[in-house]
């Protein structure tokens, strides 16, 4: 490989995991989880128009993840600098106390980071992507890099499953499903769309959103106040969905914008192709 392999490189677990189609379900789970932190979701509500630009927001998040995973080192660092600059200019008001706070508060950045990484790893593994516990630990450790990109001290970011579990136990008392979280829940179930696309939304999108919600931890279901199927049922549905999506040829899936994986393979050669069996190398 003669080109710049980027921050993660094709030898990382991240390179293999982020090429899996279940990342889209995982991303929706992350949104549900992130919304349970009152200050984090208030920052979104006050500083973005996600209700009218939902697809744009999802694509910008996917583009950031794709760039930092598969882009050159320079492209990843520039993406991180751009995020840090934007967050550094934003603030929000605590819905309970009225206190103004910065969106780039390290505690909030850490919550958003951990909710994302936990969701990516949980959904992909539970849907049948083969990762050992050691590989899962390696994946979490690799994302101290992505934590640094958004402005976190890498040493303060969980580095394995045990540390990630301890983090969620510590932050759990701060979580609640307030008005903002319920607005996100309602939006994810019924995103605005053209009238002609409403049937497709009901058939496709709501099934994906419900599956993402069902994959949340039990305490999240309790906070939202909506039940979920039994864990064994959820696991079967995740595996069935993963099996179906993975039947779509990877080259076809990777044609969707912004084509980060195809560009990485063109830059580095065919050996850079993501594949589950490479995660254990």
Image (cartoon, grey):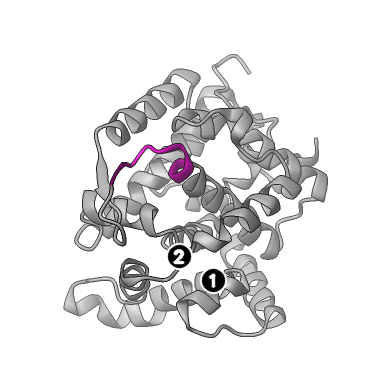
Q: Viewer-proximal residue, 9 or 226? A: 226
In this image, 3 relative to 12: left or right?
Answer: left
Contact between labelled residues 2 and 1, with CB atoms less than 8 Å apart: yes
The range drawn in magenta is 100-109
Q: Is residue 256 above or below residue 9?
A: below
In this image, 166 relative to 96: left or right?
Answer: right
Residue 59's spot in the image, x, y percent?
34, 49
Q: Residue furthest top?
A: 2
User: Which residue in the protein does label 2 denote?
Assistant: 32
- In this rendering, does residue 48 appear at all? no
On whether residue 108 falls in the magenta region, the answer is yes
| Badge 1 or badge 2: first in the primary sequence | 2
Label 2: state its secondary structure: helix
Label 1: state its secondary structure: helix
What is the quadrant of the C terminus in the image?
top right
What residue is at 68 percent from the left and 41 percent from the top? Answer: 139
Q: Viewer-proximal residue, 24 or 47? A: 47
What residue is at 51 percent from the left and 38 percent from the top? Answer: 261
Q: Viewer-proximal residue, 74 or 246? A: 74
Q: Give the distance between the C-alpha atoms of the residues marked 1 and 2, in whole angstroms.
A: 9 Å
Residue 45, quarter of picture? bottom left
Res 176 label: none
In this image, 109 relative to 50: left or right?
Answer: right
Give the number of the mark in front: 1 or 2: 1
Q: Is residue 126 above or below residue 61?
A: below
What residue is at 39 percent from the left and 46 percent from the top? Answer: 61
What residue is at 71 percent from the left and 63 percent from the top? Answer: 128
User: Which residue in the protein does label 1 denote?
Assistant: 220
Q: Is residue 153 above or below residue 190?
A: above
Q: Is residue 183 above or below residue 198?
A: above
- In this rendering, does residue 159 appear at all? yes
């Amino acid at each position: 490989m003669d080109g710049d392999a980027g921050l993660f490189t094709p030898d990382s677990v991240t390179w293999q995991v982020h090429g899996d189609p279940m990342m889209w379900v995982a991303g929706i789970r992350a949104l549900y989880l992130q919304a349970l932190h009152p200050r984090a979701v208030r920052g979104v509500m006050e500083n973005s128009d996600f209700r009218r630009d939902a697809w744009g927001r999802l694509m910008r998040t996917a583009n950031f993840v794709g760039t930092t995973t598969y882009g050159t080192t320079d492209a990843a660092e520039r993406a991180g600098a751009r995020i840090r600059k934007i967050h550094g200019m934003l603030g929000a008001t605590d819905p309970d106390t009225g206190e103004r706070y910065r969106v780039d508060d390290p505690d909030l950045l850490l919550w958003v980071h951990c909710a994302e990484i936990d969701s990516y790893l949980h959904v992909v593994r539970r849907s049948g992507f083969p990762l050992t516990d050691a590989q899962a630990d390696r994946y979490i450790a690799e994302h101290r890099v992505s934590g640094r990109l958004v402005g976190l001290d890498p040493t303060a970011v969980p580095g394995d499953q045990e540390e990630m579990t301890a983090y969620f136990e510590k932050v759990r008392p701060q979580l609640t499903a307030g008005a903002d979280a319920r607005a996100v829940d309602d939006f994810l179930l019924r995103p605005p769309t053209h009238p002609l696309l409403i049937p497709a939304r009901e058939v496709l999108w709501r099934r994906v959103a419900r599956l993402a919600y069902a994959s949340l931890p039990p305490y999240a279901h309790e906070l939202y106040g909506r039940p979920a199927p039994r864990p064994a049922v959820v696991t079967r549905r995740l595996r069935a969905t993963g099996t179906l999506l993975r039947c779509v040829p990877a080259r076809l899936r990777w044609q969707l914008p912004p084509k980060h994986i195809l560009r990485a393979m063109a830059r580095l050669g065919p050996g850079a192709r993501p594949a589950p069996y490479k995660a254990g190398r």
